[in-house]
Image (tube, rainbow, N blue to C red):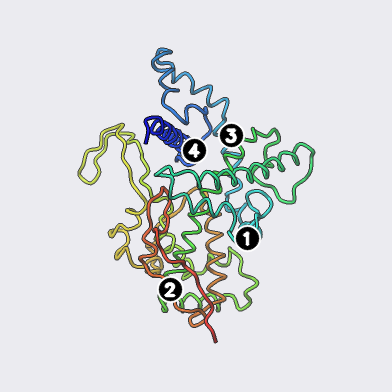
Amino acid sequence: MTVDSKVYIGGALAFFLLLGRIIYLRYFHPLAKIPGPFLASLTQLYRFYYDYISNGSYYLQFEGFRAKYEHRQYRAILNPFFSRRSVLAQEGIVREKYMFGAPWNSLDREDLGGWFNMLARTTVVPMMKLTPFVSGMMDMLEAIEKDVEKVVDQVRHGIEPEKDTIYHTHQTPPTVQLMVDEGFGFLGAASETAGNAMTMCAFYTLRDATVHAALHKELLEAFPDPTNMDFLALEKLPYLTAVVKEGTRLSYGVLHPLPRVVPETTVFNGHILEKGVTVSMCSWLLHRDPTAFPNPTEFQPERWLSPTSDKPLMDKYFPLAMCEVYVAVGRFFRRFGPGDLEPLRVGPEDFAFEDYFGAFRPTGARDFTVLRAKK
């Protein structure tokens, strides 16, 4: 290999590493969804300029950021769409049209669509092997942008939507790019988390005949007519609720340790944590804490049935996620009882999640498919 070839290869590698870093910071970093200056999201040189070149004036920029990006006002617009009342009102379409007002029909596509493929490739992010990943992400961003532009056009022409979306609330819409970024963030936050919770509920329930029988029995008794299974009725069932909570506990959500700055000097487990230091904690450790959950690796819905077991596992958008999980799990196990399905072809080793920020099934894991038993 000649010197020139090595230089070209090194330059190309450096370019793709830089491109990967930029894409990660703009779309996948924990703070990526927070509005702010573009350069500030990519490099500390933005802050360096104000702190060192402009004589420590970075703090003076904060008022300008608040006026320009209006974090509180923007959050105030979005929050009502994730309230319990809003989710209940939209239950009939929550799983297919809630975000953009129209379904993407991913289940009707042989490859499940670009979003599924992009998630499948997310595991390469830490290595920045971006050639296949960028392609899937660009396809998805293009689809989101088309949806956003359609909504903006409706607003501009005074066309009343069939259902409001998060974008119809802006009488003076923000930039298309801001709404595309927000849509991308919502899709990322909503896909693996709720999906993993449903998966773990299904896997552990099907693996334990006693749990399966108890859940199926409760659902049959509560819903002789399966057409009337709405979220409000489902969430009142104690055993279904226990299964959902236990499945959520073992799905972990964001697996990667999230950093937090200690606000005041404190003592934690006998150790002094000084004010201003950064610490991290991951959901995997909390959800497997034996002091809170005895036998933490075991799927035991009964742990949630006692009067003292009301341990909240939720985030800001919990009502939307729980509506999805309750409806999916409840309807599935109302329809299929013990003996209706073939034995599982996967085991716990296929759900030993790997940490790629979110919780992803391990490389080489067998497909989790459930087949109807032949009668």
| Residue receiving disc 3 | 73
Instruction: State the residue position of label 2.
Output: 345
Report the quarter where the C terminus lies: bottom right
Mark drawn on residue 233: none
Residue wearing tag 1: 109
Position of the N terminus by quadrant:
top left
In the displayed structure, does residue 109 sit left or right of residue 192?
right
Indicate which disc, 1 or 4, sits on the residue closer to the N terminus.
Answer: 4
SS at circle 1: loop
Amino acid bearing label 1: Arg
- Mark-to-mark CA distance, 2 and 1: 25 Å
Q: Nearer the viewer, mark 3 or mark 1?
A: 1
Left or right of 19 in this view: 80: right
Give the residue type that dot 2 points to: Arg
Dot placed on the residue nearer the N-terminal end, 3 or 1? 3
State the CA–CA distance, disc 3 to disc 1.
Answer: 38 Å
Residue 366 at what x, y percent from top left? 43, 66
The CA distance from mark 4 to mark 2 is 37 Å
Corner quadrant of residue 332: bottom right
Q: Residue furthest bottom?
A: 375
Residue sitting at 55 percent across and 45 percent down? 135
User: What kind of residue is marked 4?
Assistant: Ile
Report the residue marked by disc 4: 23
